[in-house]
Image: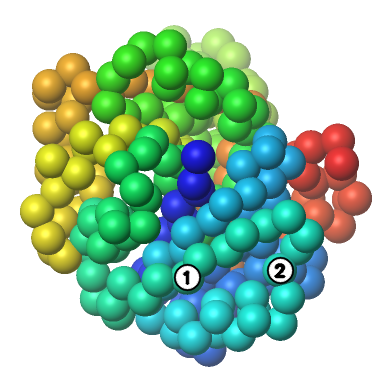
Amino acid sequence: MKVVLLAGGAGTRLAEETELRPKPMVEIGGRPILWHIMSIYARAGFREFLVACGRKGEQIQRYFDAGTPPGWSVGLVDTGPDTMTGGRLLRLRPHLAGQAFLLTYGDGVADLDVRELVAFHASHGKLATVTAVRPPSRFGSLALDGDRVREFSEKPQAGEGWINGGFFVFEPGVFDYFAGDDTILERDPLERLAKDGELRAFRHAGFWQPMDTLREKRILEELWATGHAPWMGEA
């Protein structure tokens, strides 16, 4: 099963880093976050990668031209500078040989059990699975009764609400929901898949952290510096 990585966006909310490099090449602990994400899959045995490149994609090309980790197969496809997320995936369709595949973005990590995700997807027989996560909590949580604080909690994850965690499994039939370069994956395709009953959620209650801002990059750097970054597993 191939792993598709969407790595072509502009990364405007991380402009301090992305003026000179594409967002997936922003480094955590001296390695691009793209490498960290791919390592999550590689440890689970999924080592055949297809990277949808866009703006500044030549930097991703140069990185892998310099060397690929043993056992990894990395294919890079230029999907255009301004193509939307769904459009980038649609451009990769000829490379997926009509088979089910994994998909994620090039800017978030998790201590996700990829094999468990794939097993869950296989169990329900629908076209698509999205990993549901709880967003990291930026502030302490207050439970109130009127103006009385009933409970104060400084939790690393929000206590309620699930959001798109960005780790998907798709059957080839999902392409029937895509139109062209302007297709935004998170809009029409996923909305219609949900409406048609073809989208299931794999709940991941563990660690998950995107890298949308400089503050979030620093969080990942600090975790890496401990020597026990949660997304790196036991290895």
From what the image shows, is residue 43 above or below residue 55?
above
For image coordinates 40% across by 71% down, the residue present is 77
Residue beneath disc 1: 76
Disc number placed over residue 68 in the picture, else none: 2
Disc number placed over residue 41 in the picture, else none: none
Q: Is residue 130 visible?
A: yes
In which image quadrant can residue 175 be found? top left
Q: Position of residue 131 (x, y in %)?
A: 45, 30
Work out whether residue 29 or residue 129 is closer to the camera in this orientation and state it. Answer: 129
Horizontal side of 28 relative to 139 (left or right) equals: right
For image coordinates 67% across by 57% down, the residue present is 72
Q: Position of residue 200 (x, y in %)?
A: 33, 20
Mark 2, secondary structure of its residue: loop
Q: At label 2, which amino acid type do we have? A: Thr
Mark 1, secondary structure of its residue: strand
From what the image shows, is residue 97 above or below residue 203?
below
From what the image shows, is residue 56 above or below residue 7?
below
Q: At label 1, which amino acid type do we have? A: Leu
**Cα distance in 3D space between marks 1 and 2:** 12 Å
Q: Position of residue 124 (x, y in %)?
A: 36, 12
For image coordinates 60% across by 85% down, the residue present is 62
Q: How is the image coloured?
A: rainbow
From what the image shows, is residue 117 above or below residue 34?
above
Seen as rendered, the residue at the extreme front is: 97
For image coordinates 37% across by 28% down, the residue present is 129
The first of marks 1 and 2 along the sequence is 2
Work out whether residue 134 or residue 74 is closer to the camera in this orientation and state it. Answer: 74
Work out whether residue 100 or residue 31 is closer to the camera in this orientation and state it. Answer: 100
Q: Is residue 139 visible?
A: no
In which image quadrant can residue 176 be found? top left
